Image: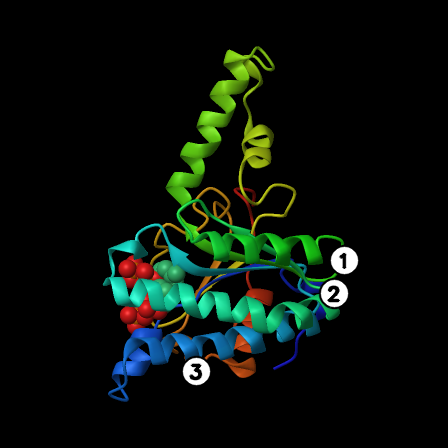
């Protein structure tokens, strides 16, 4: 399998699914799977830098994931805090620009503070942009954008006729970033589950039955290789 650097996706989004099933198959609690999933995140962030990917967006927790049992939700938040505390220095020294996308309001004050610190520390880094989607939902992101734009109209900053895709793009969490070229979903589910629904309009989708804790360089290369053979037409011929 050969990878041509010049035909790589600039922005990859990953729906990291299957941690729970990975754990259940070993008769372990679901949180064991989530912890294993963090190890994969570590590896994939390094690989994304290695392959000179510009932006990596990882779906970690959706606006719908609050429906899960309390213990799983609080376990996930705890794991996320631990990840930040452990990894941020290394992300910083690897020139990664770390950002959270999603509504952080309902997160604990401590976690919000850690997120702020991590974003601040890495804001001038020029390497990989790493977005972690936490309490993220594509629909709520679009609603937030619509409200922001409506307010701009009310304040007479713009007129209704000026509302276009550019303004929309500027109002989303992914402001200033290219749309994802490639979306990967692990665990065999064939859906987007509310991930980047506006930005995915022309993304290439790639699905694998591999569960997130088992995702590795070989599978990642398989996805990149497949991407390189896609013909992107954007409605043209
Ligand atoms: C993905 O793994 C991680 C999160 C959604 C937080 P799941 O927890 O959805 O794992 P499965 O789909 O139940 O196996
Ligand atoms: C999508 O996975 C969300 C994340 C990976 C964070 P889910 O496991 O929540 O999605 P559904 O419920 O199978 O659609
Ligand atoms: Mg799942």
> Tags 2 and 1 in contact by the CB under 8 Å rule?
yes
Determine whether 22 is above or below 63 in the image. below
Distance between the alpha carbons at the discs numbered 2 and 1:
6 Å
Q: Earlier in the sequence, mark 3 or mark 2?
A: 2
Q: As drawn, which residue projects farthest toward the bottom?
A: 26
Q: What SS does tag 2 mark?
A: loop
| As drawn, 146 above or below 107 | above
Q: Percent position (x, y) of residue 93?
A: 74, 70
111 or 76, nearer to the observer: 111
Query: Which residue is under mark 1?
Result: 126
Kindly identify which residue carries mark 2.
Answer: 95
The image quadrant of residue 162 is: top right
Real-space Cα separation, disc 3 to disc 2, in angstroms? 26 Å
- Left or right: residue 78 compared with residue 41: left
Q: Residues within 10 Å of mark 1 (few under 14, many from 20)?
A: few
Q: Which residue is label 3 attached to?
A: 214
> Left or right: 40 with respect to 125?
left
Marks 3 and 2 in Cβ contact (< 8 Å): no
The answer to whether the residue bearing label 3 lies less than 8 angstroms from the nearest atom of ligand 1 is: no
Residue 101, placed above or below residue 169: below
Q: Earlier in the sequence, mark 1 or mark 3?
A: 1
In this view, the mark in front (1 or 3): 1
Q: Residue at x 41, y 45 (%)?
A: 138
């Amino acid at each position: 399998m050969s990878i041509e650097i010049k035909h790589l996706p600039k922005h990859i989004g990953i729906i990291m699914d299957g941690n729970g099933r990975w754990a259940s198959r070993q008769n372990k609690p679901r949180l064991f799977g989530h912890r294993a999933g963090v190890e994969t995140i570590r590896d994939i962030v390094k690989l994304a830098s290695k392959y000179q990917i510009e932006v990596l967006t990882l779906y970690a927790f959706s606006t719908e994931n609050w429906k899960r049992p309390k213990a799983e939700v609080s376990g996930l938040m705890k794991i996320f805090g631990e990840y930040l505390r452990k990894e941020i220095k290394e992300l910083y020294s690897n020139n990664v620009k770390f950002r959270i996308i999603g509504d952080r309001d309902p997160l604990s004050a401590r976690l919000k503070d850690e997120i702020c610190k991590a974003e601040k520390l890495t804001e001038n880094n020029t390497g990989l942009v790493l977005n972690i989607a936490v309490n993220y939902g594509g629909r709520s992101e679009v609603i937030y954008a619509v409200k922001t734009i409506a307010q701009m109209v009310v304040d007479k900053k713009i007129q209704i006729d000026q509302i276009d895709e550019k303004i929309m793009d500027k109002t989303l969490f992914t402001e200033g970033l290219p749309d994802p070229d490639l979306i990967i979903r692990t665990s065999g589910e064939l859906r987007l589950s509310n991930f980047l629904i506006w930005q995915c309009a022309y993304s290439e989708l790639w699905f694998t039955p591999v569960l997130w804790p088992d995702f590795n360089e070989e599978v990642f290369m398989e996805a990149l290789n497949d991407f390189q053979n896609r013909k992107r037409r954007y409605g043209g011929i």
